[in-house]
Image (cartoon, rainbow, N blue to C red):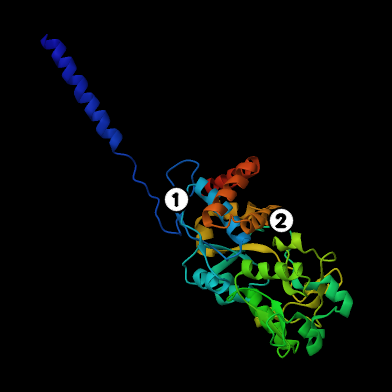
Amino acid sequence: MKLHTKKQTFAIVVALLVGLIACQSTPDRATNSPGSSRSTQVGLPGKGVKVRPGSGSTVAGQFVSEILRIGLEKLGYEVEELKVLNRTTIFLALGNDEIDVATTLEKLDANFFEKAGGEKKLERVGLFADDDIIQGYVIDKKTAEQYKLTNLVQLKDPKLAKLFDSDGDGKANLTGCPLGSTCELVIDHHLKVYGLENTVKQDKGEFEVLKADIIARYRQGKPILYNYFNLDWLTSVLQPDKNVTWLEVPFTSLPGEKGKEITQKDTTVGGKNLGFAVDRARLVVSRQFLEANPAAKRWFELVRVPFEDIITQEKLAREGQNSSKDIRRNAEVWVKNHQALVDGWLKEAQTAGKASK
């Protein structure tokens, strides 16, 4: 009996020693700072690293941002809730190191990009939409043909401008963009340089409210004048050359120092000068974050969403699926429907993260 007791005691001691050794795990060197990409977990290069994403108020930007968030989470990053901001505030946040990444337009947002620190502090990465971004001014085809309207500058004529007067002040109501957006600034600039301030004014506000007004007026058979943006559900309801027609501008002129670099060639589509540069949808990211997080950088470079999928999301939002939870859920559905593609992107991102160690 004594020998058996000693064996039991010895076994218990050994078990306790093994347990103590197992508990003394290697310290986790990952940090919560946006500039760190260290990880102790194989396959999760983002473990322990926070990412702070931002987006404009458009559903398109929020939808793509949620797809980005899903991938970052799968790479192990600790991703904060999406900050929905106007364009001015997005670049202030990027410049002040309050967010790490945001959806933007390359040329339209160029002045904001420079003011936020330019290439010394920020970097444009990837092409998150798979086609060119086109903007310009359109009117309903019926009014265009009846009054032979082809150029925005024709609205200097008070009689022609009054055709689009929806509030009774004698000026044409040009349905434009939200306050603080880049396109709001471009439209105001155009009205000034084309000499239209006395006959045309820009209606500003939330995108969905503005678009609802356009649709309502069109269905009532009233003339409409608005800023056209091809990454928008409205393009499937009112189509160029079918329902609406382009108004050219008399010459190319865009605000700010970067605007001076844009030529007529940059703003011409199909032989028509639309006034806005043909653009690309890109991510702007903190250089410090990118340098420390090659896995995230590769993910940003790879993600590309088809135009039709983005516009479908815009339509769903119009039908009531416009909350942050709705957009997140629809982004998850998109990822599931493109799982093989997304998995391939994630694998490349993980490889980039491992290669940097």
> In this orientation, which residue lies closer to the viewer: 270 or 72?
270
Cα distance between the residues tagged 1 and 2: 35 Å
Q: Amino acid at mark 2?
A: Phe
Q: Are marks 1 and 2 in contact (CB under 8 Å)?
A: no
- The quadrant of the image that shows the N terminus is top left
At horizontal 72% and vertical 54% (from top left) the residue drawn is 308
Residue 38: which numbered mark, if any? 1
* Numbered disc 1: secondary structure: loop
Using a 10 Å C-alpha cutoff, classify the residue at mark 1 as few (fewer than 14 neighbours), some (14 to 19) or many (20 or more).
many
At horizontal 72% and vertical 73% (from top left) the residue drawn is 227
Give the quadrant of residue 20. Answer: top left
The answer to whether 339 appears left or right of 22 in the picture is: right
Residue 104 place in picture, x, y as percent: 62, 66
The answer to whether 338 appears left or right of 55 in the picture is: right
> Can the viewer see residue 75 in this picture?
no
Q: Amino acid at mark 1?
A: Arg
> In this orientation, which residue lies closer to the viewer: 36 or 84?
84
Give the quadrant of residue 124. Answer: bottom right
Q: Compared with residue 68, is residue 179 higher up or lower down, i.e. above or below? A: below
- Label located before the other in sequence (1 or 2): 1
Please give the residue where the numbered disc 2 appears in the rendered image.
307
Q: Residue furthest left?
A: 2
Residue 212: which numbered mark, if any? none
Give the quadrant of residue 226. Answer: bottom right
Residue 240 place in picture, x, y as percent: 81, 66
Front label number (1 vs 2)? 2
Residue 354 place in picture, x, y as percent: 53, 45
Q: Residue furthest front?
A: 220
Residue 197 place in picture, x, y as percent: 70, 89
